[in-house]
Image (spheres, rainbow, N blue to C red):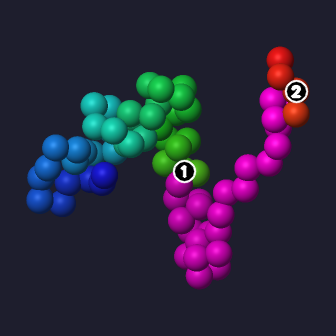
Amino acid sequence: YSIDRGLGGDNVATSYEDADTPYTPAWQERITGVPAARATQVAREFADSADKTRGKAMVIIGAAMNHWYHM
């Protein structure tokens, strides 16, 4: 899944604003409500961090309220 670089394919977006192709920022906005620009910003910040740390960047998900209590 990526932006089309001229190779074509079934699940290839023509741009990041392509809301009909899975996994683009515009596509996720319809599902999550997170603005596409914000998702793009977070992705770029994560990639920048991974570049600066030579790949030592990761997302850590901790236990939230719903992990301990069934509400």
Range shown magenta: 43-67
Q: Mark 2 falls on what kind of element? A: loop
Q: What kind of residue is marked 1?
A: Gln
Mark positioned earlier in the residue sequence (2 or 1): 1
Residue 31 shows up from this direction: yes
**In the image, is 66 to the left or to the right of 12?**
right
Can you identify the residue that label 2 sits on? 69
Residue 48 figure quarter: bottom right
In this rendered view, identify the residue nearer to me: 48 or 22: 22
Q: Residues within 10 Å of mark 1 (few under 14, many from 20)?
A: few
- Asked whether 30 falls inside the magenta stretch, the response is no
- Asked whether 60 falls inside the magenta stretch, the response is yes
Q: Residue at x 32, y 32 (%)?
A: 19
Q: Position of residue 46 (x, y in %)?
A: 59, 61
Can you identify the residue that label 1 sits on? 41
Q: Position of residue 9 (x, y in %)?
A: 14, 49
Cβ–Cβ below 8 Å for labels 2 and 1? no
Residue 27 figure quarter: top left
Which quadrant of the figure contains the C terminus? top right
Q: Where is residue 14 in the image (x, y as percent from the top left)?
A: 21, 45
